[in-house]
Amino acid sequence: MKPKNPLFWIVAIAGLILDQLTKQWFVQNFELNESITLIAGVLNFTYVTNPGAAWSLFSENGEWLKWLSMAVSLALALYGWFAHIENKWEALGYGFILSGAFGNGIDRLLQGEVVDFLHVFPATGFPIFNLADVWINVGIFCLLIIAIIFPDPKAAQDSKTSAKSSPSAPPVNKATRRDFNRRSRRYYGQDRTLRR
């Protein structure tokens, strides 16, 4: 059986694998809170753990987040399995969100916290995050593209369908045109005779 929405599943699975591999690499090669500078003032690799949500939100009481992550992941997986996603931006968006939600959900479920390592503009104190957080934001951006560029795809599809299905005038061949002209001349000729 050929799976529905291959683009959705390719993005979701590839994003999940990449997220988990990068987290494992930092766990095995960095000490907690260790940091190295990649681009001075712009990007550091800093290994920290986060019991909260993306951008370190709800760090004090994030127990419920693992169940939310798994519920969102399950809902998106069921949607991708049973629905037919026609728009490629929608498939990309939901695929990225699934990979991010499930990637962080696995961490919360198994370890009770999420591994973060991307630290952009360190001097600003911007929260450290991971690839799963990136995937979620990329997915939201893809869905925003749909909302802005394709605000009502169903209506557009319906209009295309109705245009295709509307009956068109049958083609007029030369014989039909000659017959019409002959009948017209006969009719108007009779009309002039009556007027006289």
Image (cartoon, rainbow, N blue to C red):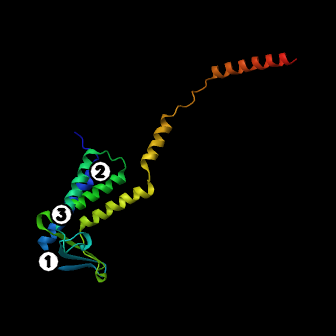
Tell me the residue that label 2 is attached to: 7
Tell me the residue that label 3 is attached to: 66
Q: Is residue 133 above or below residue 13?
A: below
Give me the residue at 25% from left, 69% from top. 54
Give me the residue at 33% from left, 47% from top. 85
Q: Nearer the viewer, residue 173 or 159?
A: 159
**Foreground mark, 2 or 3?**
3
Q: Is residue 91 above or below residue 31?
A: above
The kind of residue on which mark 2 rests is Leu
Q: Is residue 144 above or below residue 159?
A: below
Label 3 with label 1: CB-CB less than 8 Å = no
**Foreground mark, 3 or 1?**
3
The kind of residue on which mark 1 rests is Leu
Q: Position of residue 38 (x, y in %)?
A: 26, 77
Q: Position of residue 36 (x, y in %)?
A: 21, 79
Q: Badge 2, how many Cα within 10 Å: few under 14, some, many 20+?
A: some
Horizontal side, residue 5 vs residue 146: left or right: left
Q: Secondary structure at mark 2?
A: helix
Disc 2/disc 1 C-alpha distance (Å): 36 Å
Q: Position of residue 31 (x, y in %)?
A: 13, 77
Disc 2/disc 3 C-alpha distance (Å): 26 Å
